[in-house]
Amino acid sequence: MKLSVIIPALNEAGRIAETIARTRALGTCEIIVVDGGSDDGTLDAAAHADLRFSSPRGRAQQQNVGAAASQADVLLFLHADCWLTPGGFDAIRQALRDGRSVGGCFRQQIDARGPGYRMIEAGNASRVRLLQWAYGDQGIFVRRSVFERVGGFPEIELMEDLYLMKRLKREGAIRLVNHRLHVSPRRWQHRGLLRQTLRNWSFLALSHCGVSPSLLAARYEEIR
């Protein structure tokens, strides 16, 4: 079961090399970095990736570009500010040994102290178990054949991960694997834990009420 790790990036020169190195240490894989028009030298800093591409900005489009270039049976979409501990690839393979599973994600470990962060981790894990919805910062993995069958990420400006999940759950089970994915706390620390969490919930609710991703994206500020 060959694995491609696709890392969408934008102005991540300060951390992309470390993300690649940590991913390489997990075992044999193909690492693909797709840059969305950085102006800080991100693509140069990603020199140790197997493949590097430039793409129009937009995480959905960047991830689709990476998936199209990959050669593996399984795709792992990894945000540049997330990293897996050893054993992560084995956890993916174990989850997909069940033929009913089309993909899944990891348990988060937000790299900050405090009960609020632990509650976010627990809530996000419960969302996957109950609703089969994984978000991008949970490390989404998927069988390549299924990803292609559902048309990949919908190329919308925001919440592409949620819309992909809705497509995937119609194809089979989404697994929450009991392995930790470290996540940078920068978004919560920049905006405030409660404010960021309420903002995420409001975007989810508005999306289900039919508000277009483009309108939501106009109110979204990417934190790097």
Image: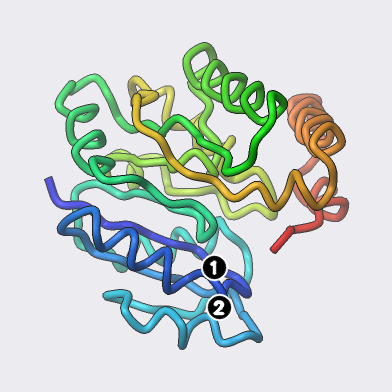
Q: Residue 145, how many percent across, how many down?
A: 25, 43
Q: Amino acid at mark 1?
A: Ala
Could you say which disc has been placed on residue 13 in the image?
2
Q: Is residue 16 left or right of residue 190?
A: left
Report if the CB atoms under discs 2 and 1 are less than 8 Å apart.
no
Question: 10 Å neighbourhood of mark 1: few (<14), some, or many (≥20)?
Answer: many
Residue at x-position 84% and y-position 42%: 192
Q: Secondary structure at mark 1?
A: strand
- Which is more toward the observer, 186 or 74? 186
> x, y (%) of residue 9?
54, 68
Q: Which numbered disc, 2 or 1, marks the residue closer to the eye?
A: 2
Q: Which mark is residue 9?
A: 1
Q: Please tell me which residue lies in front, 171 or 101.
A: 101
Question: On the rendered structure, is 170 left or right of 1?
Answer: right
Q: Residue at horizontal 15%, vertical 58%?
A: 28
Q: Residue at x 50, y 63 (%)?
A: 8
